[in-house]
Image (cartoon, rainbow, N blue to C red):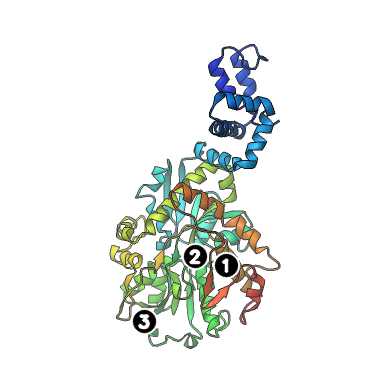
């Protein structure tokens, strides 16, 4: 028997006294017997009844149809013509009560976290009925450990991190998700001022570089760039993980020769006169992902309504941040000490794309950083190829399966629609890195095509 026994059980109760089905002594007994075994069934009954009412607005026609074929057959027929399952899912997400309103979301103080941070002072969380504490955190390993230990409900992470956590690379395996990308572009290779005459990477043999984390787009792009110029990043160069807030100090102390890192620290190195911007990461791959909103699979499944509200707040904030006219307002909102603790002028240069490069020029690039929440599966597959290329994951891997389980494009598309945004065609993304096209349907061939690799 379908959970939809009779969509007009409630309607008859309004029009008749006593038990509407004739099998119970009172209305109370009937109601008790009619209550579904769980809340999902109850939700489904409400949706099914509404659909039948919409299809058969006349009482006599509706009753005649149900009596002629029976409720179960009727709903089966309707489901073959109408996306009933989708309607049930949408209703369940919208109607369910938020399971947990007080949340902690960790973040690293970089401009990549702009949507997660600005959603606090600008009221995006509150609008969704949430009381979110955004917690400034020292480094990516700490972010990872605190989310794994459930000290944080969700977190700002580097986009490769949920993939690595899911696969057990660098930590015990635990299913993790990336339901939204925070930013695209927004990184740079910054060199010490003492190297302003060494703009050719072939002159960098023996250099020491910093990246934010081993599992980061920064690490993969820097390695890609060096290898394309004939340098083996594990033999000719030293690459070390340094928390972003410590990068400028290490550059000033000559502990490193440069870094591929996030802003505001590229621009802060220029502001402090200790470094210059060699190139923006968008010059390597325009539109590349960097950071993401991440949560455990357990959080997504155990608190679906809280998850939906949190994701909707972040998607809405990301959409707001994507508009250039909002960038100065955002710079002021995220500049204070409890957020990025940076001069507003530094943040404005980054967010507006009009910036000093440290070599005496002022450049304009409105796409220096941008914000696009859609977690493309193609992004995940490319990241996995680089993890494989550099020996971070071994053996065979089902690239598409992992990408779909971690990068939740379907959830993002649904909530983008609810926020009034138009989600993109999931198959439309094209990726080209340093002039080389990437075919996500042939990831192993892509890995094999590189002369310098660790596999």
Tell us which disc is closer to us: 1 or 3.
1
Q: Are marks 1 and 3 in contact (CB under 8 Å)?
A: no
Q: Residue at x 66, y 32 (%)?
A: 74
Q: Is residue 449 above or below residue 122?
A: below
Q: Can residue 354 be seen?
A: yes
> In the picture, residue 345 is in which quadrant?
bottom left
Query: Which element carries disc 1, helix, strand or loop?
Result: helix
Query: Which residue, given by chain and number where applicable, does mark 3 sit on?
Result: 193
Q: Position of residue 17 (x, y in %)?
A: 56, 12
Gap in angstroms between the C-alphas marked 1 and 2: 10 Å
Front residue of this view, candidates 274 and 328: 328
Query: Which element carries disc 2, helix, strand or loop?
Result: loop
Q: Position of residue 225 (x, y in %)?
A: 51, 79
Q: Can residue 152 be seen?
A: no
User: Which numbered marker is on residue 289?
Assistant: 2
Give whichever of discs 1 and 3 has the lower sequence position.
Answer: 3
Image quadrant in which the C terminus is located: bottom right
Q: Are marks 1 and 2 in contact (CB under 8 Å)?
A: yes
Gap in angstroms between the C-alphas marked 3 and 2: 28 Å
Gap in angstroms between the C-alphas marked 1 and 3: 31 Å
Give whichever of discs 3 and 2 has the lower sequence position.
Answer: 3
User: Which numbered marker is on residue 383?
Assistant: 1
> 54 left or right of 420?
right
Front residue of this view, candidates 63 and 341: 63
Give whichever of discs 1 and 2 has the lower sequence position.
Answer: 2
User: Which numbered marker is on residue 273?
Assistant: none
> In the picture, residue 72 is in which quadrant?
top right
Q: Position of residue 31 (x, y in %)?
A: 60, 20
């Amino acid at each position: 028997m379908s959970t939809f026994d009779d969509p007009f059980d409630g309607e008859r109760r309004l029009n008749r006294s006593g038990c509407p089905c004739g099998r119970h002594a009172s209305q109370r007994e009937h109601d008790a017997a009619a209550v579904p075994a769980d809340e999902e069934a109850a939700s489904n009954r409400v949706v099914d009844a509404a659909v039948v009412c919409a299809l058969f607005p006349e009482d006599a026609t509706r009753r005649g149809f149900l009596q002629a074929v029976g409720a179960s057959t009727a709903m089966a027929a309707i489901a073959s013509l109408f996306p009933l399952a989708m309607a049930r899912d949408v209703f369940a997400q919208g109607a369910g009560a938020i399971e947990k309103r007080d949340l902690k979301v960790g973040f690293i103080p970089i401009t990549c976290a702009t949507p997660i941070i600005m959603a606090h002072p600008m009221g995006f969380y509150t609008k969704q009925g949430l009381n979110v504490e955004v917690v400034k955190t020292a480094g990516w390993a700490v972010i990872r450990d605190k989310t794994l230990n459930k000290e944080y409900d969700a977190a700002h992470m580097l986009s490769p991190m949920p993939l690595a956590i899911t696969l057990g690379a660098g930590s015990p395996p635990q299913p993790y998700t990336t339901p939204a990308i925070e930013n695209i572009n927004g990184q740079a290779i910054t060199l010490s001022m003492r190297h302003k005459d060494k703009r050719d990477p072939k002159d960098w043999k023996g250099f020491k570089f910093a990246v934010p984390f081993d599992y980061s787009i920064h690490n993969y792009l820097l390695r890609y760039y060096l290898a394309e110029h004939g340098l083996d990043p594990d033999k000719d160069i030293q690459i070390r993980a340094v928390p972003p807030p410590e990068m400028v100090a290490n550059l000033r102390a000559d502990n490193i020769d440069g870094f591929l890192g996030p802003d505001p620290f590229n621009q802060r190195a220029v502001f402090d006169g200790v470094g210059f911007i060699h190139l923006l990461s968008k010059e390597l791959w325009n539109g590349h992902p960097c950071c993401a909103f991440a949560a455990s699979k357990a959080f997504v499944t155990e608190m679906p309504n809280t998850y939906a509200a949190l994701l909707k707040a972040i998607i809405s904030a990301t959409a707001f941040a994507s508009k250039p006219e909002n960038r100065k307002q955002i710079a002021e909102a995220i500049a204070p000490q409890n957020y990025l603790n940076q001069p507003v002028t530094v943040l404005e240069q980054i967010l507006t794309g009009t910036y000093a490069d440290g070599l005496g020029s002022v450049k304009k690039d409105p796409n220096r950083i941008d914000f696009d929440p859609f977690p493309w599966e193609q992004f995940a597959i490319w990241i996995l190829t680089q993890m494989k290329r550099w020996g971070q994951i071994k053996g065979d891997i089902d690239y598409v399966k992992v990408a779909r389980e971690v990068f939740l494009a379907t959830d993002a598309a649904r909530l983008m629609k609810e926020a009034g945004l138009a989600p993109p065609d999931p198959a439309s993304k094209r990726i080209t890195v340093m002039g080389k096209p990437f075919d996500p349907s042939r990831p192993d061939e892509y890995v094999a095509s590189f002369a310098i690799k660790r596999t």
